[in-house]
Image: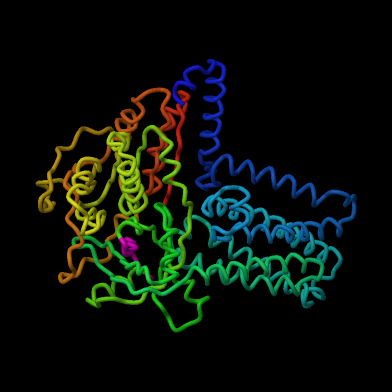
Amino acid sequence: MKHERAREQPRTWKLRGAFRRLVWWAGERVDVFGYDLGKRGETLVAAGWMVWLLFLSVCQTDDDYLHLTKRFGIVGASQLPLHYLLALKSPLSPLQYLTGLSHSDLNIFHQLLGRLVTVLFYAHSVLYLNFFIQSNLLAKRIRNRDVLLGLTAITCFTLIGTTALGFLRRWNYRVFYTTHVVLATALLPVLYYHVHHIRIYIYEVATIYLAQSLLRYVTTATYPASLILVPGTNLLQIKVPLDSRSLRTRWSQAHYHPGQHVYAALPAPYPRLLRNLRTNPFTIANLPHRDRELRLVARVLDGNTRRLAALGASNKTTVPVVLEGPYGPADHLSTLLTCDRILLVAGGVGATFTIPLYRALCAAAEARGDRAARRRVRVVWAVRSAAETAWALPPDAGARERRAFEEDVEVYVTRGRVGDGMVEPSGARATPPPPTHAADDIELGPQEHEGLLTSHPDQPHAAEPLSTIRYSRPDLHSIVSETFAGGSGETVAAVVCGPVGLSSALRREVGRWVGRGREVIWWAEEFGW
């Protein structure tokens, strides 16, 4: 493959480089007065779709005011089936099959389309209210069922859109999620009885809604799990043994892939719909098919994770846990295996995404007998304390795998250093901190700073912290430059999971090399909110 590339004409290389720069440019985020509109490419697609919807709204309406007013409402309602379909999590979603995009990718367009639909419904409502006021009909029509239901619907859309704003989601994700699900469900009967000519779209939405409920039911089961608090941290481990005698577990085990996630919750006496409002997404933090167990790791903050941690601190041997999934792309590993060099960067519990990928890459290299493959993978992990790395390997991991971790995984402790009140973990080697540039200093996000729970003294130790520790922040400029130093013809994969600040800093550094025409596969798994 490299020889074929070497024979390509310079013009082809220039075109490829220009296309890569264009794709990278489309992946940059758009910020307007501090409000994040999404990536440039996504925003352009949404803008183009809005132009099309506006054209449909005004086409052949001429000077008919009421025709235009009704058209805004009909066009907005016609987008609801697509809007709900974009929110379908299951990998059986037809949109995922048709586009090849994952749920997380499609969810971005779900958000953008929701804004467009809200704008159309606002135009419909404002024009109708203006007509009632100009015709002195407001006092009479405001008491009619269709108007009352219309105002109820626009109020629901307003609440959904408001609670979906970034700062409100960061403030309380549970409020956003509950409001979103409850009002999205309540809107169906409201719109159905609002006017009859949009009922065909409500039927379609109801069908999608029922299909999603059925798929969630099929992928949900209750398992006995061990809840373990990682000593010296506020991290919680959920371990679910995989029993090969269970048909459902055997099916799930075959479909668990690095980088995917599941939803976990405690069983509750209230209906399934209400229980779904109290679930949390957890990235699969290990290789279930190899470790014979499913392991989840999360930082204990509040709500569901606090309730799970309370059970873990109570020294109960096992507790029932409801798991739904898995969700997310299953092709991360196959994509990385096509690359010449791989850079995996994580902040805090973001390593639940990158560490399983690293272990899967090592397992694939071992299966091929490729001893040099590990040297092409670089793993960087920034944590608050060395103790937060204890979960990375299963307790029964062999000496060979532990030695590989010690050699390959670069752990950077960003809060404190040896001699500054920080206790050195047993058996750990401290590496003196190299000088860093201010622009490259990476501080973990708010979720990483607030410790709400300490481990219970009677909890067993899951594993020792990783051995090679650097008490500094990672110098991303040097790390990225070293990764791209291998050769101009290499394809480099850069994968990051962590706070938005870490992802943005890494993207800036990688972007310098994209600007030089280098081929890069980029994936950012952000957990900022």
Which stretch did the figure color magenta? 292-304
Q: Dividing the image into 4 quarters, which one contains the C terminus? A: bottom left
Between 166 and 413, the one nearer to me in the picture = 413
Q: Is residue 3 above or below residue 150?
A: above
Q: Quadrant of residue 67?
A: bottom right
Q: Residue 238 vs residue 145: left or right?
A: left
Q: Is residue 213 above or below residue 104?
A: below
Residue 9 location (% of width, % of height): 54, 16
Q: Residue furthest right?
A: 63
Between 141 and 463, the one nearer to me in the picture = 463
Let me know if residue 421 is in the magenta part. no
Residue 528 in sight from this viewpoint: no
Let me know if residue 296 is in the magenta part. yes
Scheme by which the image is coloured? rainbow
Q: Which residue is rendered at x = 30% and y = 41% of the image? A: 379
Q: Which residue is rendered at x = 73% and y = 69% of the image? A: 203
Q: Quadrant of residue 285?
A: bottom left
Q: Is residue 8 above or below residue 482?
A: above
Q: Residue furthest bottom?
A: 269
Residue 180 location (% of width, % of height): 56, 66
